[in-house]
Each structure stands twice: as C-alpha cells, then as structure tokens.
Amino acid sequence: MDTQRTTPATPYSRDVSRPHLDVAGISIDCSDPVELARFYLALLGGELLWENFESAGI
C-alpha cells in the first residue's frame, strides 16, 4: 500500500474550512483626525461622513 501523499497537507488545504470574517471598521488614533481622514479620502476616495474636534468618519 502506497502511503505517500502527492500534495502536502497544510492548514489551507481545500478540505479545511476557513472562518468567514467581515471588517466593519478600523479606528486609528491620531492628533488631527480630520487631517488624517482627508489624507485617506485623497488616497482612496470616498466621502467624509462626519468630522468634529476628536473624530472623523469616512
């Protein structure tokens, strides 16, 4: 009986199911949140959802 595998077993093999993950948001602490938000808007696009002296959302 031949016991050699043709492909190595890994945690990413097709017979192993992986959990599903959705990212709802990321929080970054900084001294000027509005400036950082505008930077990422210029880089990635999108829209500014809110801004105040301690937070901004995109």
Image (tube, rainbow, N blue to C red):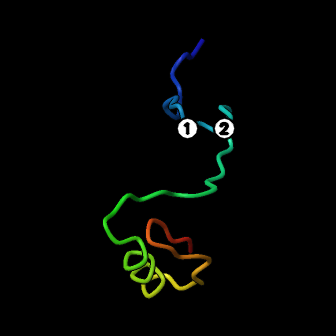
Closest to the observer, 40 or 4 = 40
* In contact (CB < 8 Å): disc 2 and disc 1: no
Numbered label attached to residue 12 = 1
Could you tell me which secondary element the residue under label 1 belongs to? loop
Q: Quadrant of residue 54?
A: bottom left
Residue at 68%, 32% in the rendered image: 15
Q: Depth check: 15 or 32 in front?
A: 32
Circle 1 crowding by C-alpha within 10 Å: few under 14, some 14–19, many from 20: few
| Picture quadrant where residue 38 is located | bottom left
Q: Is disc 2 placed on a helix, strand or loop?
A: loop
Depicted 23 relative to depicted 33: above or below: above
- The residue under the point 48% across, 31% down is 8
Question: Split into 4 quadrants, where in the image is the C terminus?
Answer: bottom right
Amino acid type at mark 2: Pro
Q: CA distance from mark 2 to mark 1?
A: 12 Å
User: For the view shown, which residue lies furthest in the top direction?
Assistant: 1
Height in image: 22 above or below 42?
above
Q: Nearer the viewer, mark 2 or mark 1?
A: 2
Tag of residue 19: 2
Q: Specify which label sits upstream in the sequence, 2 or 1.
A: 1
Lateral position of residue 20 relative to residue 41, left or right: right
Q: Where's residue 50, x and y in %?
A: 59, 76
The amino acid on which the numbered mark 1 sits, given as a three-letter code, is Tyr
User: Is residue 29 rendered to the left or right of residue 57?
Assistant: left
Q: Which mark is residue 49?
A: none
Q: Is residue 54 placed above or below 19 in the rendered structure?
A: below
